Image (spheres, rainbow, N blue to C red):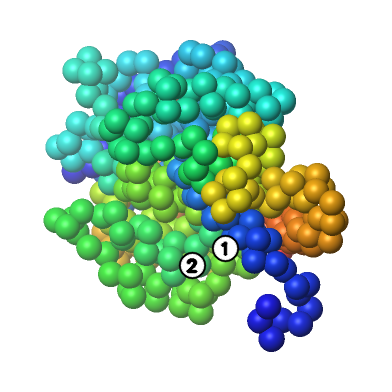
Amino acid sequence: MPEFMPFLPEFTPEEWTAIGLSVRVAITATLASLPVAILAGYALARWSFPGKTLLNGLLHLPLVLPPVVTGYFLLLAFGRQGPAGAFLYDTLGLTFSFRWTGAALAAAVMSFPLMLRAIRLSFETIDRRLERAAGTLGAGPMATFFTVTLPLAAPGILVGVILCFAKALGEFGATITFVSNIPGETQTIPSAIYTYTQVPGGEASALRLAAVSVTIALLALIASEVLSQKVLKRTSVFE
Amino acid sequence: MSVLEFDCTLRLGSFALDATFSAGTGITVLFGPSGAGKTTMLHLIAGLEKPDRGRIVIGSDVLTDTSARVFVKPYKRRIGLVFQDAQLFPHLTVAQNLAFGSWFRGRADTVIESDHVIEVLGISQLLSRRPARLSGGEKSRVALARALLSSPRLLLMDEPLSGLDEDKRHAILPLIARIRDEFHVPVLYVTHGRDEAVRLGDSALRIERGRITAAGPPAQILAR
């Protein structure tokens, strides 16, 4: 425990490992989801295409499906024997089963709908006449997207990022089903808490990790609330 | 000399536009009551809307020609449009809004100097502000400057002063006349204000229910 942070509880090395792994998994999941969520959010907000309702439903499915079911599907698809898993191993040498990368994949799939929803909403609230104005000033569709649409959507996108990160940090059901609960490899904070509650004398560890979860979740919610307020202010005509 | 040739028909619900006119250098005022189709005509020229049938030519460039299947994209037309409610980018400062106009202009185009525009429109003290902190009159002037700085071949103005009170309107009217004289940009100016039309117009077109009903010198066209 660093001397300069006396307010932190004394974490054991195992607990630090779980915290560090959780953060790595959540950051990876969030960064990997972001470009996909921006593309899908834009498509759902702006384009009409056949199967849009179905796509929207599929993308939001992890929100309502039992996490164990999502984890099981991931195991079937991305396990070594699964079609997607075998393909990714053969082409890119990527392995997901029983690896931290698998935990990141499970966290990404589970938290994606939250990010998508925030991003889609922020694209929907943009005044499209501003994009039209950019066009009359000579900006083509790509230039307009990067100079007008994306910056105007940025606060909403940040809210999506924060919610996704917080959700990814807490993912349990799909993760434990897909990649099990291996200390140092796939044992994130929630899995570690679960383990500590199963063994005698683990209460203190479980409590400390629970406190970490609560702190991070609260900070994320506050940050997203502050950012939402900023969005309202920016899109408002009055100041 | 004719700058713009316009001949289009467009049906939007129960409204039908069927107009033919040409506009020369200087300020051409498009005068008529609300709902007469003035804004639709500007949108057709800027390429924000497609006509059912018609042809729009600027100088020697065909921008729209339904029979030849020509439709130049709005961002390639180099036609400035000053919107009724300014439409400044809220996430950019005034200086960045102005720069937006010049970022995307082609190399070969006639360049309108930004310092000159800022001076003529008297907006130098606003450059670091955000649009949310501008008054209505300030927004109008910035929107006008932004459109000018994209070095347009033709400047379309859609009732740019309609949201302003009498005093502000009188302060900006001479600026618009100065823009014509200093930057030699032909202007198509939409208004339903008789006073504005007479003061600014070098020529005028009267539009009613989607049709041009009169064309000529403003004083003559606008007399009842």
Residue depicted at 78% across the width and 60% down the height: A205
The numbered disc on residue A229 is none
**Residue B62 position (above or below residue A22):** above
Q: Is residue B221 left or right of residue A225?
A: left
Give the chain letter at badge 1: B
For label 2, the crowd category at 10 Å Cα-Cα, with few meaning under 14, some 14 to 19 and many 20 or more, is many
A124 vs B167: above or below = above
Residue at the spot 47% in from the left edge and 58% down from the top edge? B143
Which residue is identified by label 2? B94
Dots 1, 2 in contact, CB < 8 A: yes
Q: Secondary structure at mark 2?
A: helix
| Residue at the limit of the structure toward the front, as seen here | A200
Label 1, label 2: how far apart the Cα atoms are: 7 Å
Residue A204 vertical position relative to residue A144 in the rendered view, above or below: below
Question: Taking B76 as reference, is B97 left or right?
Answer: right
Q: Quadrant of the C terminus of chain A?
A: bottom right
Residue nearest the viewer, comparing A161 with A178: A178
Mark 2 — on which chain does it sit?
B
* Residue B110 vs residue A66, the one in the foreground: A66
- Say which label, 1 or 2, has the lower sequence index: 2
Query: Looking at the picture, which amino acid does disc 2 mark?
Result: Val
Q: Which residue is at a point 62% across and 21% down the rendered structure image?
A: A57
Front residue of A52 and B158: A52
Q: Position of residue B147 (x, y in %)?
A: 39, 55
Location of mark 1 (residue): B131
